[in-house]
Image (cartoon, helix red, strand yellow):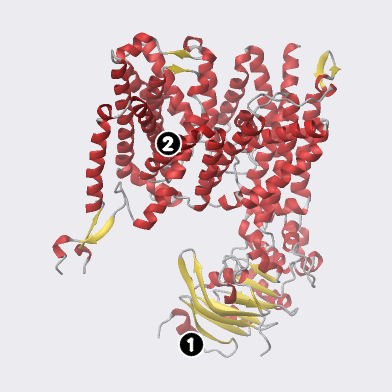
Amino acid sequence: MPDPLLKLEDLDAFYGDFQALYQVELEVAPGEVLAIIGANGAGKTTLMRSISGLTQNQAQMVRYRGDTIGALRADEVAGKGIALVPEGRQLFPSLSVQENLIIGGQIGRKGPWSLKAVYELFPILQERRHQQSTSLSGGQQQMVAIGRALMANPDLILFDEISLGLAPIIIKDIYAALPGIIGEGMSALIVEQDITKALSVSQRFYCLQEGRVSLEGSSATVAREDISRAYFGVE
Amino acid sequence: MTPSDFQVTRSSPFTKAIAVIGLLILIVLIAAPYWAGRADMRLMGELFLYLALASLWNLMAGYAGLVSVGQQAYVGFGGYMLFALTIFGGLPPVVAIVGAGVLGALIAVPVALLIFRLRGAYFAIGTWVIAEVFRLSFAQVSALGGGSGSSLPVGIVRSLASSRAGREHLSYWLALASAVIVIAAVYLFLRSRNGLALTAIRDNELAAGSLGIDIWRTKFIVYLVTAALTSMIGALIFLQKLRISPDAAFSVNDWTAFVIFIVVIGGIGTIEGPIIGTLIFFALREALADLGTIYLMVLGAVAIVIMLKAPNGLWGLIRARFDLELFPLSYRVKPSKSDMKG
Amino acid sequence: MEWVNALLQGTLLGGLYALFAAGLSLIFGVMRLVNIAHGDLIVLGAYLGLSVTTVLGFHPMLALIVVVPAMAIFGYVLQRGILNQTLGKDILPPLLVTFGLSVIIQNALLETYSADPQKMNAGALETASVSLGGLSVGVLPVLTFAIAIAVIATLQWIFYRTALGRAFRATSDNQEIAQLMGLNRRHIFGLAMALALAVTAIAGIMLGIRTSFDPSIGGGRLIFGFEAVIIGGLGNLWGTLVGGVILGVAQTIGAKIDPGWQLLAGHLTFLVILAVKPNGLFPRISE
């Protein structure tokens, strides 16, 4: 295995006053797509926050390209090429669709993604570019959120519950588009409730249970009963 | 152990000891005319009045989340009502003080209906606008001296007590009584149902609302009670000063800035905070008064540093270190006595 | 004709109040901070202008090129050094810290310049007037009003047409997500305060040319600015200008009835509008 792009070492992280993650070890190789599964409250969101810098930890707990980034602020982490598509989309309501995309790219990293490329991926957004982002449907808002993250031309993109609250048909479309999005040499971490969806687009997976990694392995070969055990913690 | 092996209680041997010590201190203070000099008594009287104002401001800001920078409205209003009720109403001064409180609560009703429409910090500036309206309005009342103010007639002053010493003792006792009454009122209020509601609001307004606590009503009651008591203290203050003018009565520095500094330095949201803050404020003032403006700059800087570095004030620091509570408000769990052997 | 004149003077006075209010509105819009020291910062701007005119011999309007950047830098340092530490869910820290700041600025000015009222000398500009259909209108009030319009138009342009404005709006919407876009909110807030104090500097100089000032008048200027913001509706800069005009007209008409009624008429108008339309005439931010 080549040098990992991202490496979590002995990560303890807190959500408010509560410890949400215990000694988590995790690696993402360049170009790899990783799924993170686990029940509600297993620590998935805190994991995303810790990688993206929204939760600051001890520096050496998160390594990225060999740099220790665990103690950096979110804006510094973003500048290093990590982008997050947050749970619940969280677009900027006072910005138009196009402004939401532009602000995603304002870090100024070079790469394949531009307004033009995002509009080619999601043509409907070009049509709606001058609308307020809140006037869009849930699926279209998710497209803006994904486009906004892509505009930063990240090397690692984090997807936090992208299918939450969307109609099944829309989820299907988004997952159909996902390989094309990630296919450009980017690494991705996908947090997802729907285990089948998550495994279908990823090469490897990690399962979290009560803040600890309870299982990791290859997405294609894992046995269902192993996942159930790791997911719910029942024998 | 089962749950019945524990009892939940507010008091402890320590708080009982504190209550006894507090009572002794109070007796010594009541006897001050027999052991203190006139200047000391004047100073202590002023200290008690500030303590009362600070405790009231703390009740609003620290517990009800109503941050006012306009409490001078009620200090000045109470002062003017004392003058109006004694001069035109012919009431004895002590009755006029109570009357000022009642009128203060009455005028607070329309005021609250208006400024409760403003949220958070805008509420604060709204209270200041109200104080300005009061100041400008009283400056228009020529019967009370207009912009230049007026003095309390000698006859009314004499009606308090015939001798000068008697008057000084009486105003000292009134000041002491106001501090004791206000602190006791705040303490009992916080232990009551309304007080519990307040604590719930302070801790989490959204959750308190969903638990069926009428937030608006509770805040409204606090605002009215504070207005009434602040007006009474205002009446007392100007009974001591014997002279009133709009600028002195509605001074934002004297009646609000100092009070806020006292509470912030002592510790906001605790009963003990204003007591400690008042003592420190007067100690600083006695030590640095010669420095004038520099003293005020130091006071402002101390308040900023405390707000940033120790937002719970000096009492917060003490409490964090020693786990003390002079006024038992929080419940503690301890093993029941009967089960101590088990 | 006398009443028409009062109406016109009041409208022009509203320009000055809009200048008082613009910085307050900007800061609240970006970071939900209400700066109690805002009025004292206006007065600080006036005193800095006074020092520049007396030391360098500049005309007050020329002093702007020194005072505006000086206040902007002060704003950035103040925000990064102190005010950023107060921002959070609790409204008490920003309120009490800016209150402390207000007392410090007021007394520092008292210590430096004494309590004597001061005024800036703007020479012919102060007395120049043009005749407008039988009414004599001072050039200075007209200039102040024009500057107010220019300032608000510029702020509006920055907010809705530039990358900085986009960053302001994004940070105002959601600070965490804005951080994910690579925006350091501490820096963004510093820039917002710098911009606000640049406007405050202009307000201070226009105030100092128009009337005499002393260190104690900050609170009153804060209240005028605040009233203009609330009347106009939170978060609406053009609304703030309308709010300033309404306040200015109320004051001049009040003064026409009885000189003692000038300020009272303004405050009462504010309270009536608060009672009838609690969100102001043209609200944008719902809070």
Instruction: Report how far apart the C-alphas of labels 1 and 2 lie in the structure.
Output: 71 Å
Instruction: Identify the residue at horizontal 76%, vertical 60% (top origin).
Output: A102
Q: Where is residue C239, by image quadrant?
A: top right
Location of the C terminus of chain A by quadrant is bottom left
Q: Residue at x 58, y 53 (%)?
A: C85
Q: Where residue B3 sits: x, y (%)?
A: 23, 64
Q: Residue B282: which disc?
A: 2
| Picture quarter with the N terminus of chain A | bottom right
Using residue C209 as the reference point, say whether residue B6 is left or right of it.
Answer: left
User: Label 1 neighbourhood size at 10 Å, few (<14), some (14-19), many (20+)?
Assistant: few
Residue A91 image position (x, y, % from top left) = 65, 59
Q: Is residue A23 above or below residue B212?
A: below
Q: What is the number of callouts on the image?
A: 2
Q: For the residue marked with disc 1, what is the amino acid?
A: Asp
Numbered circle sitting on residue C197: none
Q: Which residue is mark 1?
A: A226
Whether residue B210 is visible here, answered yes or no, is no
Q: Looking at the rendering, which quadrant does residue A110 occupy?
A: bottom right
Q: Amino acid at mark 2?
A: Phe
* Residue C214 percent across, percent down from the top left: 65, 27
For disc 2, the neighbor class at 10 Å (few under 14, some 14 to 19, many from 20) is some
Q: Secondary structure at mark 1?
A: helix
